[in-house]
Amino acid sequence: MKTGVLLFNLGGPEKLADVRPFLYNLFSDPEIIRIKFAPLRKLVAYMIATLRHKKSEGYYSQIGGGSPLRRLTEEQAKALQEELRHRGRDVETFVGMCTWNPFFDEALAKIEQSKVSQLVVLPLFPHYSVTTTGSGFAALQQLIGRFPAVSKIPIKRCCSSVRTAFRKVTLRTVIPISTRRNSPSS
């Protein structure tokens, strides 16, 4: 049984010319700019990208002219695949980004061609946030239907219950048992 592991991250501009379209993609996300009317949200994203790109380009210039995120994520995916294969697992890793190359649809196309029998989705964010992990899962959920072979395989989402687990731990450690009423974890 071949397992696919999709590592996902936000993405980032790889060169200075990518900064403005990257910012537009970032701020077009309905989980980041919470305007339901898409044309208005895209207008706001365009305005932010137009007003912020020069300043952001300056920051990216300071770190070599682009984000190292894709390279680092691909290195992590390769290392994970090698380690799991070394342990006898039939695994293939994939990289998808929320707002820049390689986009999720590119990753899903590769997953579809790979013929994996199950998929683990692994966000690389240090904690759960609606604007990162949540946004990525929402985008994937929307895209998976376009890939019939992928939509038929079992998909496990790592950290899909992080918020629930965190809430339970917080309730148990911070709020004394005698004061908890109607809590979902009691």
Image (cartoon, grey):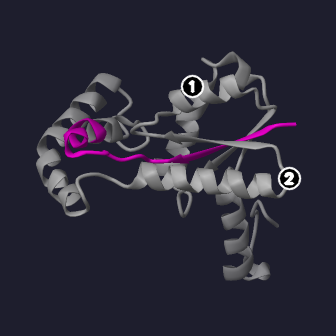
- For this rendering, which residue is in front, 4 or 98? 4
Q: Judging from the image, what secondary structure is the residue with disc 2 in?
A: loop
Residue 54 higher or lower than 141, as above or below: below
Please state which amino acid type lies under the numbered disc 1: Leu
Which residues are drawn in magenta?
Answer: 1-22
Q: Please state the horizontal and vertical placement of residue 114, each as a whole percent of the image.
A: 70, 28
Q: Nearer the viewer, mark 2 or mark 1?
A: 2
Residue 77 higher or lower than 185, as above or below: above
Left or right: where 165 falls relative to 139: right
Q: Residues within 10 Å of mark 1 (few under 14, many from 20)?
A: some
Please state which amino acid type lies under the numbered disc 2: Gly
- For this rendering, which residue is in front, 183 or 70? 70
Left or right: where 36 falls relative to 112: left
Residue to which mark 1 is pinned: 143
Residue at the (57%, 56%) spot, across then down: 76
Q: How many marks?
A: 2
Residue at the (56%, 57%) spot, across then down: 128
Residue to which mark 2 is pinned: 88
Answer whether residue 96 is magenta in the image.
no
Q: Which mark is residue 31?
A: none
Left or right: where 126 falls relative to 87: left
